[in-house]
Amino acid sequence: MKSRRYFVYILTNKNKTVLYVGVTNNLEKRLHEHITRRFKGFTSRYNCHHLIYYEEFDDINIAIAREKYIKDWSRKKKEALINSVNPDWQFLNDGSRITKGLSD
């Protein structure tokens, strides 16, 4: 039996002035939804579709708890988290750098 994977992710806009924290069980699909503005809301209003951070979990309850935990953080603390793994704030979904392995 294949285990499910869940992702907590952080998106930003082109100028890196806005941060959005979300959770999903299909990061590649969810990124596509953000890019195409499938749902109206924060990410479509602020053009947030550049992936700059993500974590992977096997348990949805832990992923949801982590998302809520990070959402409560200050911007400074979120920036420190992003900088710990992506100090240049590279857009990880540009050129499918990471998304190739997410749909396996």
Image (cartoon, grey):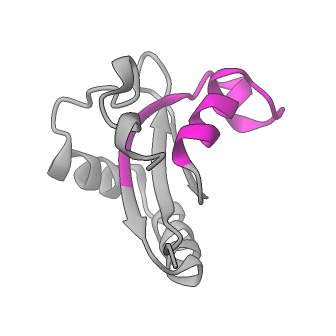
Say which of 25 and 54 sits in front: 25
* On screen, residue 17 above or below 69: above
Judged from this view, the residue extending furthest toward the right is 40
Closest to the observer, 16 or 51: 51
Q: Residue at x 62, y 21 (%)?
A: 47
On screen, residue 17 versus residue 52, left or right, reads: right
Badge count: 0
Q: Verify whether residue 50 appears in magenta.
A: yes
Task: Identify the residue at image location x=38%, y=20%.
Answer: 94
Q: Is residue 34 magenta?
A: yes
Q: Position of residue 22 (x, y in %)?
A: 58, 54
- Give 75 or 40, whichever is nearer the viewer: 40
- Image vertical order of residue 81 relative to residue 33, above or below: below
Residue 6 position within the rendered picture, expressed as x and y whole percent measured from the top left: 52, 65
Q: Is residue 73 left or right of residue 79?
A: right
Find the magenta span and give its range. 27-54
In the rendered view, would you say 59 is above or below 4? below
Residue 102: where, in percent of width, then height?
Answer: 42, 47
Q: Residue at x 37, y 25 (%)?
A: 96
